Image (cartoon, rainbow, N blue to C red):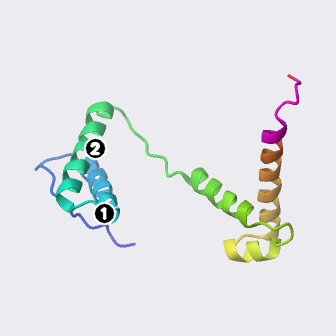
Amino acid sequence: MAKPEFVFQFPENYPDVLEQMGQVIGRTLLKNGMQKPKAQVAAFESVEGIRSELGGAFLYINKGVSYELSLRDREIWDEFDGKNYFELSKKHKLSEMQIRNIINAIRAQELAKRQGTLGFE
């Protein structure tokens, strides 16, 4: 995996992790159409906000695997037509059993949302 490009300048001796965050924020702003001078300012102000609000705290940044899996599972649910287990397993590089388990779990969640507690508590 190629190392991300450092596009923006940060003050000398600025904390490395904050500069990396600023680079990510800045590249995202550029990708979304913001001009580089404004993206530079916005990225720096964003990491300064993080530094002032969270500075000094031990901070673990979760990779968000369960979030990504949740998005994938919802995509599978949206693509499910009632009988395309095999096609979905090939597309998402999962076994048919994994696809069936995902569909069954989301079906149960959807049913629970619609039915609620049915007045029983």
Left or right: where 6 falls relative to 98: left
Of residues 100 and 107, the one drawn nearer to the viewer in this rendering: 107
- Residue assigned mark 1: 33
Indicate the amino acid at tag 2: Ser
Left or right: where 3 falls relative to 41: right
Q: Is residue 48 visible?
A: yes
- Mark number, residue 67: none
Q: Residue furthest top?
A: 121
Label 1's element?
A: loop
Label total for image: 2
Relative image position of residue 92 (x, y in whole percent): 68, 71
- Mark number, residue 46: 2
Distance Cα–Cα, label 1 vs label 2:
17 Å
Residue range corresponding to the magenta coloring = 112-120
Relative image position of residue 46 (x, y in whole percent): 28, 44
Q: Residue at x 82, y 62 (%)?
A: 100
- Which quadrant holds the N terminus? bottom left
Label 2's element?
A: helix
Indicate the amino acid at tag 1: Gly
